[in-house]
Image: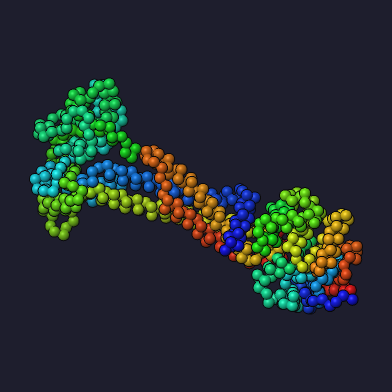
Amino acid sequence: MTKSRREIIGIKSVSKIYNLGDTIVKALDNVSLSINENDYISIMGPSGSGKSTLMNIIGCLDVPTKGTYKFNNEKISDMNDNQLANIRNEKIGFVFQTFNLLPKLNSIQNVEVPLVYSSLGRAERSLKAKKALKIVGLEDRMSHKPNELSGGQRQRVAIARALVNEPSIILADEPTGNLDSKSGTEILNFFDSLHKAGNTLIIVTHEDSVAKRAKRRIEIFDGKITLDE
Amino acid sequence: MNRIINYLIDVIRGVLFYFSQTKLRTALTLLGITVGVSSIIAIMTVLATFEKTTDQIVSDVRTNVFYITRENPIEVSFGDNNKWARNKPKITWNEYEQLKRSLKLIENMSAVVSEEPSDRTFSVGKKEFKSRIQSFWAADGDILSLYKYDIIDGRNIQEVDINNRSRVAIVGSDIKKELFPFKNPVGETIKIDNIPFEIIALTEEKGELAGQSMDSMVGIPISTYLKYFGGNWRRADLQLVLESESIENIDDATDEAIGVFRAIRKIPPGDPNNFYIATNDQLMDTFGEFTGYLKTFVGLITGISLLVAGIGIANIMLVSLNERIKEIGIRKALGARRSDIFLQFLIEAILISLLGGIIGIFIGLSFGNVVALFLEQSPVIPIDWVFYSLQICASMGIIFGLYPAIKASKLNPIDSMRFD
Ligand SMILES: Nc1ncnc2c1ncn2[C@@H]1O[C@H](COP(=O)(O)OP(=O)(O)OP(=O)(O)O)[C@@H](O)[C@H]1O
Ligand SMILES: [Mg+2]
């Protein structure tokens, strides 16, 4: 047994409800979840089951309709905009399902964006961004814009951007969905090494091979957690 | 402090990068401000040129000289007081002679009538002076020294010419150049409206002032003018040119002239003068007043056009805000604070209006100085207005960028990221 670790994410009876006039969508339905430091979690579930919704709430991008979310034992609902921005910037690296790269910026500029908001000098920024791009194997595509990159390359830029600020928590929403098995494996190997270094990883995936690397497996169905082991 | 500056440089670089990615939109936004600022700067440059020119005119005429006329020449030429001026009595020969007898502080005094420019024909033999003569004057006394013309050959108009109403004329160097290219004009005959005059003097070249040649000039005795061109002595409307002994006592001399002239005209105490007395200072003041009005007017017009340009900025900022909601969402998701987004948009608005202002200043200076070139003036830069323009632009950027900036900063990350 591993020694008991500190809880960093505490979700209690959280629901996310979209009221679309005639229909009500419960994207998350009374979900409770506790995540400790250095957890390595995979989240699986069919399309539309609420995986991205959960990730957005964990990543402080979205707020629950009901329930409480404590990050580092502090209620998110009590934090002001700047505190949330700081968490997003320093504590969490988010790999979006749809990448969300800025179309006018090239790879290195895209990767630099989180650093721009963390008061780093220009030289240091580009150094870190280059390092992150090297990790995902894109050192030869630094000045390409997103529309000049393949889907898999875009995904890797998005991963590099999530890693660049060396956040302690990585939230990755299908990070290998567009990658061939070789570069997918490289990324996952790197995630494994992050876990060994003490980081917390939460990865949404459809692939069993990805889920097997994780130490904890969560399954979601219709907005409810159906498995957590 | 250093951190803040570095941060601002970052934001500015980001904004400039964004401009470079959206050149057409940036150019269109610039246009409104550029037009407004360039027009204000062009007009202010022209006015500065005019001011310089009048300064020259005034310093060119001796400063212990002042004038008594029926009306204020500048106000009349700008039109509004004409009716009022017509009700004032003309300055008569009789009044001139009484003044001349009574004034103690005046060293030199002339009565002048002048046509500026003249529509008469000036010819030698069959050859006619092609353009209009800029100044055809007729005077009594030593007007040449009052107007600072030097005779290079010949003699001045004398007492005897006045008394005999002699047909004698002094000509400027333009007349020699055109009508006597290879000859000394002194002693030759020039015909004014076909009446022959003997040329008694040629004056030294004075060059141009405010785009007009000072040498396109012909002068004759005032008595002769009134006999041949002016009709009745009593109807002549004289301008009096007076010179005090020194610059120091010009105020006393003008006071004396006013007092004596009021006595001659029997104006009751408390009534206003029914004549106009102008020192060079007053001429300058009147001109200054006129340019003051013009500046206010121009200021108003540009104010309105800048307001329109400003609304244009706000509009484009709001449009670009809509197009960039996704970008704002992504930036917020990656850690941008409200203040980061707010500053990004505000600085964008300020930079674009400053940029438009700077371009406008350059265009305005170029246009204005083309006019200065025509007036044969060295280039002028109305520094004060350059600064005002920059200030106006910066505040416009702040005012019209504020609303879009606040709106952008309040967007919530997840909804904006989903926006398409
Ligand atoms: N802004 C929204 N308005 C209305 N309904 C929404 C909104 N966002 C998500 N939903 C709904 O919430 C449910 C969960 O969506 P979510 O994106 O979390 O699914 P997912 O598990 O990530 O699916 P996938 O594997 O396809 O990415 C879906 O049924 C979706 O239609
Ligand atoms: Mg999803």
The quadrant in which residue B178 appears is top left
Q: Nearer the viewer, residue A43 or B62?
A: B62
* Residue B302 sits above or below residue A57 on the image: above
The quadrant in which residue B373 appears is top left
In x, y percent, where is residue B210? 33, 40
**Residue depicted at 52% across the width and 53% down the height:** B354
In x, y percent, where is residue B301? 43, 53
Q: Nearer the viewer, residue B263 or A153?
A: A153
Q: Nearer the viewer, residue B338 or B138?
A: B338
Please state, as top left, top right, bottom left or bottom right, where the N terminus of chain B lies in the image. bottom right
In x, y percent, where is residue B223? 13, 35
Residue A227 shown left or right of residue B419 in the figure? right
Residue A36 in view of the camera: yes
Q: How many numbered marks have been drawn onto this rendered protein structure?
A: 0
**Residue depicted at 15% across the width and 42% down the height:** B108
The quadrant in which residue B300 appears is bottom left
**Residue depicted at 30% across the width and 28% down the height:** B130
**Residue depicted at 62% across the width and 57% down the height:** B10
Residue B128 in view of the camera: no
In x, y percent, where is residue A114? 70, 61
Residue B400 shown left or right of residue A163 in the figure? left
Colour pattern:
rainbow
Please state, as top left, top right, bottom left or bottom right, where the C terminus of chain B lies in the image. bottom right
Residue B402 shown left or right of residue B177 in the figure? right
Residue B149 shown left or right of residue A190 in the figure? left
